[in-house]
Amino acid sequence: MDQEKGNTGIRLNKYLSEAGVCSRREADRILAEAGRVQVDGLPAVLGQRIQEGQQVTLDGQLVTLEEEEIYLAFYKPKGIVCTTAEQENGQRICNVVDYIQYPKRVYPVGRLDQASEGLLLLTNQGEVMEKILRGRYQHEKEYYVKVDHKISDEVLRQMAKGVPILDTVTRSCKLWRETEDSFHIILTQGLNRQIRRMCDYFGYRVVHLRRDRVMNITLQGLKKGRYRELTVSEIRKMKQELGL
């Protein structure tokens, strides 16, 4: 056991993270929703610690620590929702976990909106999820973007400098043209629907959006709708970049 566990148990948000359920921040949000998480059949509370042998459930499902580290790269098609939930807004959805049907519990690292396709990482390692998702670490994510009409060089230059969206200004980013109406972009932050909002600011509508890379992991060799396990060298390099 690590020091945080010790004789006083492990914080429940850390337990959920290490079990691959979600990041610690997301765990705190889940714990704030009364009754979703229970320890030995009793509702859990924020800041609670659990001892070895206690049973933790989320939405009635037992949560256990998985010793095997699992890292998957998945080419998400359009229409698949990056969640483990079965419904959104009262409507049944096709979520990514049910779609790939991996035999062990894994969770998507962040989201790729339903109308977009491309690389999605899945893992059971909460700490890795946390570090990839935190914007302050500025890990690169690369996308291919096609818009509804010809995009000018000046718009691409302005977009690279930063765009005011969502009460903030996007970080400067790398951009290069593919065709008269498409380009590649590398982001180091993950604002909600960021690329679509950036294009909309200049009067363009995104008609195709594909994520090609997350850090050192790419779509290369993956067919749409299929997944693969990361190689040892990919995992090693990713962990080095994450400082793990």
Image (cartoon, helix red, strand yellow):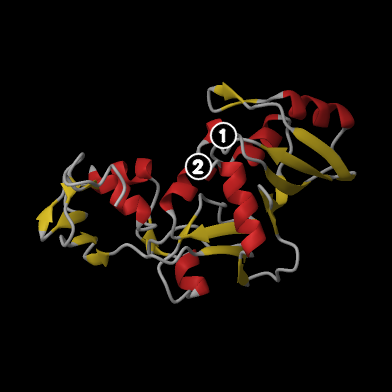
Q: Position of residue 120 (x, y in %)?
A: 59, 57
Query: Callout 2, which amino acid?
Result: Lys
Q: Is residue 236 left or right of residue 94?
A: right
Residue name at image x 44 percent, y 55 percent? 125
- Please indicate, yes or no, whether residue 64 appears anywhere in the rendered image: yes
Q: CA distance from mark 2 to mark 1?
A: 7 Å
| Vertical placement of residue 234 versus 14, above or below | below
Q: Nearer the viewer, residue 89 or 182?
A: 182
- Which residue position is annotated with label 2? 131
Note whether 200 is above or below 128 in the view shown.
above
Q: Where does residue 162 sit, x and y in percent of width and height? A: 69, 24
Q: Amino acid at mark 1?
A: Tyr
Q: What is the secondary structure assignment of the residue under circle 1?
A: helix
Task: Please indicate whether residue 6 sits to the left or right of residue 186 in the image.
Answer: left
Position above or below: 20 against 6: below
Q: Percent from the top left, x then y, of residue 216?
A: 68, 51
Residue at (24, 48) in percent of width and height: 12
Give the numbered dot on residue 163: none
| Disc 2: CA contacts within 10 A as few (<14), some (14-19) or many (>=20) | many
Q: Nearer the viewer, residue 243 or 154?
A: 243
- Give whichever of discs 2 and 1 has the lower sequence position: 2
Quick check: can you spot residue 94? no
Per the image, the residue denoted by label 1 is 137
Whether label 2 touches label 1, CB < 8 Å: yes
- Residue 58, given in percent of the width and then of the height, sits at 25, 59
* Depth check, front residue: 143 or 116: 143
Task: Indicate the quadrant where residue 80 lies.
Answer: bottom right
Numbered disc 2: secondary structure: helix
Question: In the rendered view, does 40 fall on the left or right side of 238?
Answer: left
Q: Residues within 10 Å of mark 1 (few under 14, many from 20)?
A: few
Question: Who is closer to the viewer here, 202 or 212?
Answer: 212
